[in-house]
Amino acid sequence: MSSNPQGHEESVGTARSAASETSGRLRIAVLVSGGGTNLQALIDRAEKGKLDADIVCVGSDRASAYGLVRAQRAGIPTFVVSYEKYLKGPLDEPVDEALLGSVDARQRILADADAEVRRDRIRRLMAAEKEILAHLEAYGVELVCLAGFMRLLTPFFLSRFRKNDRPGVVNIHPALLPAFPGRHGYRDTYRYGCKWGGITIHFVDEGEDTGPVIAQAVYPIWDEDTCDEVQQRGLHLEHIMYAQVINWIARDRVRLVPRSDGRPRVCIEDPLYREVVGSWVEATFRPDPLVEHRRT
Ligand code: GRF
């Protein structure tokens, strides 16, 4: 693993030039809640020397997440933060009303009309996030990669990784956003009867699945597919895409271009960008070992 690059001005997110020149590789954390096949794909890439970042820790909100086993098998430190502890029962820490008010004003993940209910929920999320942040800071994490992490993050957490207006948390979503946000991207795509499914990798902003899109790709859905087969084909694509996007960020190839409507556009500065995206989609037409059994 590389040395700790804390202290560099440009230490988070897409701002790689200063940090990578002086201290080497990007330090990433992967947060998971479940099986962790995306994490496994990143570990496999790293073991082949094809990931331009170091996975310095893996965190979860669930002690039983199989992703933790995958990390431990690869020798990556893990941690668990139990949200249940924070979401139910009394909280020890006194409320910082000013901070809570500013997080509430910025967040777009909770829509409860009752301000008291909403602020209580945000306060609890922030308490859990504080514990996660302590772990991430101890490992000198520069970029947080969500890979099936089933918790919404507040601006309190996000702002700790934002530097010079650049976000430092990315997420992979199993649908072509803004279609089918939320927890069931594959199921919703399949039930709608889509002929193409999609994958989106985006920066995380104050809303749910609303942040600037870094990369998208599509895969075909055939008439005879089951929902499970659709998911397997999509996951295969996710596994290819996530490592590439992390590499683009690590190589400082990802630019946020401000726009007059306030929503930045993400541009990838890679001369091979079109070929890469083409290869992603093409890969989804190749026989997929995971679903091939059905066809024989
Ligand atoms: C993936 O489909 C990802 O897009 C979504 O959660 C799922 C995680 O799968 N955010 P895995 O745990 O990586 O297998």
Image: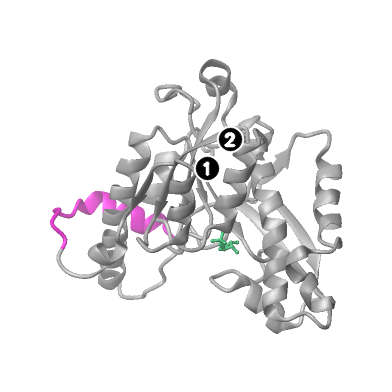
**51 sits to left or right of 289:** left
Q: Position of residue 193 (x, y in %)?
A: 76, 82
Q: Write the start and end of the magenta stretch as one range.
A: 91-108
Rendered residue at 38%/48% (across/down): 157
Report the front residue among 132 and 231.
Answer: 231
Please tell me whether residue 197 is drawn above or below residue 201 in the rendered image. Answer: below
Residue 168 appears in view:
yes
Q: Position of residue 255 (x, y in %)?
A: 66, 36
Q: Residue 111 shows which numbered tag?
A: none
Report the front residue among 151 and 40.
Answer: 40
Mark 1 and mark 2: span between their CA atoms? 7 Å
Q: Amino acid at mark 1?
A: Pro
Q: Which residue is mark 2?
A: 14
Is there CB contact under 8 Å for labels 1 and 2? yes
Assign the C terminus to one quadrant of the image: bottom right
Rendered residue at 46%/60% (across/down): 66
Note whether ligand 1 is within 8 Å of mark 2: no
The reply to whether the magenta stretch includes residue 60 is: no
Rendered residue at 43%/54% (across/down): 68
Rendered residue at 35%/36% (across/down): 137
Quadrant of the rendered structure where residue 6 is? top left
Q: Residue 167 shows which numbered tag?
A: 1
Q: Position of residue 119 (x, y in %)?
A: 28, 64
**262 sits to left or right of 191:** left
**53 sits to left or right of 206:** right
Please tell me whether residue 228 is drawn above or below residue 159 in the rendered image. Answer: below
Work out whether mark 1 precedes mark 2 in sequence or the reverse, and give the earlier one: 2
Q: Amino acid at mark 2?
A: Thr
Colour scheme in use: one colour
**77 sits to left or right of 37:** left
Residue 176 appears in view:
no
